[in-house]
Amino acid sequence: MLNLPNTITLSRIILVIVYTVALAIDGSVSPFINEVTGGWFQPISVTACIALWAFVVAAITDFFDGYLARKYDLVTNFGKLIDPLADKILVGAAFIYLAAVGICPFWAAILIIFREFLVTGLRQLAVAQGQVIAADKLGKWKTTAQLTYCIACMTQLAYGGNLIEPLRSLSIGEIGWWFRELALWTSIILTLWSGLNYCYHSRHLLRD
């Protein structure tokens, strides 16, 4: 029987479907839009805006399901397995799209997705041996950095120049670029670090 935290986790997977469908409908979104018309916070793409907010809500649920599970002692083996899986689906969908439209470097997306497959494989080995590998704090920090980068990129796609036009004299666009770069490299470093950490602590699973 599903409890509240697990239900929230499953809702994150549903939001990924909303995110993917919205972006699939609008194939005209370009990361290179510089000049747009309209008012502040007016989206340049309605479907990209829907995708952005579906992604934001999904990212928020990543905090609440774990918080509620720990606070009300609702931690289950199912939750330990489905929560990291939902994170991987969410992050993977975002990085695949961002790489496809030319925002995220292709090699970075491959590296991040490879790490997720690697950790998933280790978890499958653990389950086969009657163990469950829960997400650790380093993995959570990694996910936070990845979600921050994806949200920053999706915000640019959804709102573009409209978001920064009133503040263009403050070079907000340049600050946004540096912020995305910082979030990306933080994600890459934490991805490598947490991946190696999982491998080290799971090395016993590879022994017969």
Image (tube, rainbow, N blue to C red):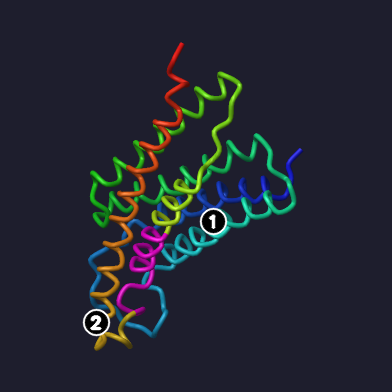
Most extreme residue toward the top, as rendered? 208
Indicate which disc, 1 or 2, sits on the residue closer to the N terminus: 1
Task: Name the residue beneath numbered marker 1.
Answer: 58
Which residue type does callout 2 highlight?
Answer: Ser
- Identify whether 44 is placed above or below 87: below
Q: In the picture, residue 57 is in which quadrant? A: bottom right
Residue 93 shows up from this direction:
yes
Residue 200, position as x, y percentages in the image: 40, 31
- Image point 33% across, 88% down: which residue? 166
Indicate the secondary structure of the residue bearing disc 2: loop
Which residue type does callout 1 highlight?
Answer: Ala
- Image point 43% across, 18% down: which residue? 206
Task: Name the residue beneath numbered marker 2.
Answer: 171
Main secondary structure found in the magenta portion: helix
- Nearest the eye: 142 or 18: 142
The image shows a total of numbered marks equal to 2
Q: Within the magenta stretch, is there residue 21?
A: no
